[in-house]
Amino acid sequence: MNDEQRIDDHQPPTTNHQLTYSIITFGCRVNQADSLVIEGDLRARGGVDVPAEQAELLVVNTCSVTANADQAARQTIRRIVRNNPSVKVVVTGCYATRRPDEIAALPNVVRVISNNEKDDLVRRAGTVLWTHQTTADRDGDGPCGETLAPGVAGRTAMTLRVQTGCDQVCSYCIIPTTRGASRSKPLTAVLADVSRAVAAGYKEIAITGVHLGSYGRDLPDPSSLVELVGALAVWPDDVLFRISSLEPMDCTPEIVELVASSTRLAPHFHLPLQHGSDDMLRVMRRPYTAAYFRDLVELIRSRMPHASIGSDLIVGFPGETDAHFDEMRAVVDRLPLTHLHVFPYSDRPGTDASALDPKVDGGLTRERGRQLRVIGSEMSRRFRESQVGSVRRALVVDDGWSAVTDNYLKLRLDLQHARNEWIAIPVS
């Protein structure tokens, strides 16, 4: 047993005091899903969500994909502690895993929890979270978290993590180091999680993972993403599943066909290209070509003309010449995508790319990023215009004046509706 005291697994602490907490999440959908689990654990123990400036506990779930992500976490912790000097800070996530000593040196940080221990964060941090402990706390039992209802902490849709870790070692990426090897949740457990989410009232669930396409390969009884998506495609309840970011080589024709043929699966894809030059893709260790990516996007577009297809791009990768960038810009400009996320390259110590030369000037990187964002904005405009006049199924979100369509358009409503309600809405 861990030498840290545990919290009662079966009943909340027998005290009138309710711990107030706030959770701040940086980065990807996997982190969002992780934070949802942490929040369920805190609420199962009687915790109450409040603004960060009023909380006794601040949980910061960090990202470390870029230096800016690291800096944002540090700045956020310092700012909140200035405004709330008595707050206890527990930090987890990729930055906390990569640089625990840096995190521990920040003000008011009382625990640094690695990604491998994140699912157990509340128990591991229990000795600093609860000032009043029951006999059960001291004896080492601890509660399981609850499935939060839609709308709690501002979330209408649920993000469900089915896999973590990554065995695909891209030259620029620190995530295999901070998340470890690929680890999947058994299919029966995933489907049980989906059943609980549906029973709690969720009508939309995003299925996510660090390397989602590798789902099931590591299990003693091997499974696959195709098997998982196939089970979701025939789910009996009225719920919509979004398949989160997929590496291009993992978005197989079988996956495309399942999405195209099922009303349970959202016509929404996120496929990170990262670069349009095959030379750069090889140095990045991305196992596909620009032509492969183009053929994949055109397959999706031919089967689902209405589908949303987004992508990620990196600018300023070491050795990226004007010719490489021009090649990327030309490739991207011809792709029938709907939106782009553009990232400036950021050196991550410990990755092979950090040792590559020559580095690209920061000003040039910013200009290249600006040009790609202009292309991305035009893509989004064209896609939205192409959908005008169609009627899409949409889920009401936020304050009831907005809805998100199955193909990922966010629309403003003329009349307020109940949050988490399905509506049919004309795109205008």
Image (cartoon, rainbow, N blue to C red):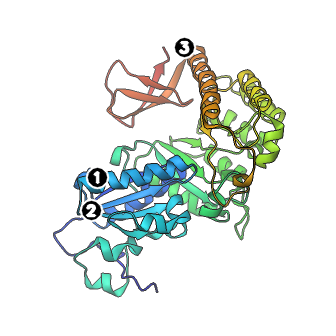
Q: Earlier in the sequence, mark 2 or mark 3?
A: 2
At horizontal 77% and vertical 43% (from top left) the residue drawn is: 252
Residue 286 visible in rendering: no
The answer to whether the residue labelled 2 contacts the one labelled 1, judged by CB atoms less than 8 Å apart, is yes
The answer to whether the residue labelled 2 contacts the one labelled 3, judged by CB atoms less than 8 Å apart, is no
Give the residue at the far left of this rendering.
Answer: 16
Secondary element type, mark 1: helix
Q: Earlier in the sequence, mark 3 or mark 1?
A: 1
Tag 3: amino acid: Val
Corner quadrant of residue 36: bottom left
Corner quadrant of residue 355: bottom right
Secondary element type, mark 2: loop
For the residues labelled 3 and 1, the Cα–Cα distance comes to 41 Å
Tag 1: amino acid: Ala
At label 2, counting other C-alpha atoms closer than 10 Å, the crowd grade (few under 14, some 14-19, many 20 or more) is many
For the residues labelled 2 and 1, the Cα–Cα distance comes to 9 Å
Q: Nearer the viewer, mark 2 or mark 3?
A: 2
For the residues labelled 2 and 3, the Cα–Cα distance comes to 49 Å
Secondary element type, mark 3: loop
Disc marking residue 94 = none
To which residue does mark 2 refer?
Answer: 87
Q: Earlier in the sequence, mark 2 or mark 1?
A: 1
At label 3, counting other C-alpha atoms closer than 10 Å, the crowd grade (few under 14, some 14-19, many 20 or more) is few
To which residue does mark 3 refer?
Answer: 388
At horizontal 28% and vertical 52% (from top left) the residue drawn is: 52
User: In terms of depth relative to the viewer, which is nearer, 330 or 319?
Assistant: 319
To which residue does mark 1 refer?
Answer: 52
